Structure formats: structure tokens, C-alpha cells
Image (spheres, helix red, strand yellow):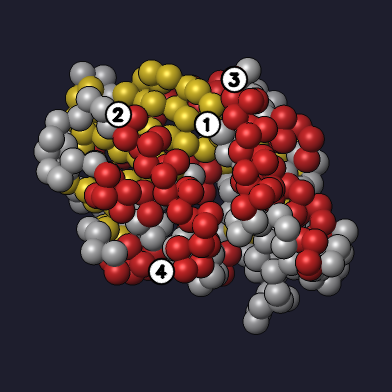
Amino acid sequence: MASPATTSDAPARTGAPCRAGSDRPLALVPVRCCICDLDDADPVAVGEDFEYRTSPDSFLAVRCRRCGLVYLNPRPDNQELDRIYPPDYHAFNFSEGEFGFVYKVRRRLEARRLLRCCRALDPEARILDIGCGDGFHLDLLRDYGLPGWRLEGIDSSERAAEAAGRRGLTVHRGRVQDLDLPSDSVDLAFMIATIEHVDDPPGVLAAVGRLLKPGGRVVVVTDNAASPDAALFGGRHWGGYHFPRHWNLFTASTLRELARKSGLEAESVSQVASPVNWVYSIRNRLVDRGSPNWLVERFSLRAPVMLAYFTLLDALLCRVGKGCLLRAVLRKSP
């Protein structure tokens, strides 16, 4: 295994502003591959928190020699979560007031994607969103889905749970594997941009499987570590690393292995078009090179032109199985 990530002495560059306490290194812990439980990996990237500048650390991403999983090692200790997810983290307040036109477009696109996954559900189905953030997806299901659907979220962040609560949504605060929720009670679960953030992906999916009814499904959407953008920017600047918040990054094959280890059946694994990793990969490179702020801000979640361009590009890549995101539908045995 390569040596652990080291603390960088470089000053914060253009991009997110310096934060109080951001000069203190994070508490980091060594980990193993969550699929193989082995500490046998090759280094693939070293990067920094280009987006939020929550610490001065450099972080090491490695690839397991056995299964190919890409993961952060060492990674922040769980006690650092409040720090690496600052109050202005985008998932805590993705709103029209903050993101304007981009928010409106994304609502329509995401609503269509969600409803495709819900076609066969009963009128009174129970739907659970794990890692629901501010409740964006649950809000879409409430607005565009059937009125009898029972919608609930889970998030371990107090900020996220409070934001979702302000939308009038039911949210359980905590980790899914720690909550006392009834078994065999959920028809459909979503984990959208969640599995890459958790410390124990097999344990989380096994806990979700316990909650699912026999034959129930969980839809997992996550970054594709085998995408062209990952190949192009993967040595340091790839947006999918989201240093230091993405702890495990998957390919189609490692997602299938994760499902098997968690006791679920991988019914399908496909690609989903997204511009985010393309835009943030370029942004990270610009920040790292000290580019002027006016140029950096051309590549963000508030930049509709670049988001539109890379959405079209990634939609074309999805046609040949090379999209930015993976969508896995995992099923509990009936």
C-alpha cells in the first residue's frame, strides 16, 4: 500500500474562501477495501478540498488490487463530519433562491427520472430516501407522484434533517443501520449520491435490505469511476473524488460485488447523464492553478451554459455506456 496522505503547506487558492479553523489538519483514519476487506491497493490520485477548503490536508485515493474499488485512504474520522460538510454545503440548501434557473431545470429532469423508478408501485407504497439531504427528491415525489405514497427520509446530518423538516417532510435523523425502523416495510428506497459518502457501504445496504419488503428495490445512483471524465482528470482534479467527502467510488463491476456482499441482487446497472463531474473537474484544475475567480465561477452549479453543454456531452457518452453516473437497481429476494 502507498504511504498515507500528507498535510499540504500550500495556501488556499482561488475558489472557496478560507474558513475559520481550516488551517488545522483533519483527524484521519486508515481503512481497508470495503468489498474485499484487504489493505492491498495502488495509489491513483492525490488532491485537496478544492471546493470548500475545509482543511489544509492532501488526500490519497487508492485502487484495490483485487476488486478495483477506488477509495480514500486514510479518510476523515467520523468525528470530522460537521467540519467537512460546512453549513453552506450545497446538499443542505439546493433551492431556487440559491441556484435559480439551474434549480428549475434540474427539478424537471430529476422528477422524470424518479417517476420512471416508481412506475409499478402501489398507490399507498412506502418510499424511503436514504441520505435525503434537504429533501429535494422527496419534495419532487410529493409534488409529482401519487398522493397516497408514504414518503420518508433518513439523514445523519442535523443541518440536512432541519432543512428537510422545513419543507414539511418526515425525516429520521441518524444512520440507517442504527435506526429502529420496521423490517420488511419499504417498497422502494433511493440512495442518490449517498453510497459514496458512507463509511460502511455493505453494512448500509444490508440495513436497507432489512427494511425492504420481499421483492422490494433500492435505487443507487453514484459516480462512475470508469467514466471518460475520471480517466481524463483522475490523477488529481476529477470532480468525482469530491475530496475529502467521497470515501468509496464504484464501477459497474464493483457495484455488483457490493450488492452481492450486502445480500441483494443487482437487477440492473446502467448509466445516467450528468454534467457535474465534468464541470467540477475543470473547476478543480482552475482552482489548483490559481486561475482568477471570474473564470473559476464559469464552472459551477450556477453556470447554466456549461451545465447544458456537458449534459449533452454526457448524454452522448451514456449511449455507449460511458456516462458520468451509475444507476444500480438492487432487489431483495422475494
Which quarter shows the C terminus? top left
Depicted 203 relative to depicted 68: above or below: below
* Residue 100 seen by the camera: yes
Q: Which residue was labeled with disc 1?
A: 272
Residue name at image x 41 percent, y 44 percent: 108
Helix, strand or loop status at disc 4: helix
In the picture of the structure, the residue carrying the numbered disc 4 is: 159
Residue type at tag 3: Arg
* Residue type highlighted by circle 2: Arg
| Residue holding disc 3 | 319
- Near mark 1 (Cα within 10 A), the count class, few <14, some 14-19 or many ≥20, is many
Residue nearer the viewer, 91 or 317: 317
* On screen, residue 331 above or below 21: above
Q: Earlier in the sequence, mark 2 or mark 4?
A: 4
Q: Residues within 10 Å of mark 3 (few under 14, many from 20)?
A: few
Residue 110 percent location from the top left of the image: 42, 42
Are there few (<14), some (14-19), or many (20+) residues within 10 Å of tag 2?
A: many
Residue 306 rendering spot, x and y as whole percentages: 68, 48
Q: Give me the residue at 61% from left, 38% from top.
A: 311
Dot placed on the residue nearer the N-terminal end, 4 or 1: 4
What is the x, y in percent for residue 41?
71, 33
Which residue was labeled with disc 2?
Answer: 217
Image quadrant where residue 29 sits: bottom right
In the image, residue 288 lies at what x, y percent?
A: 83, 58
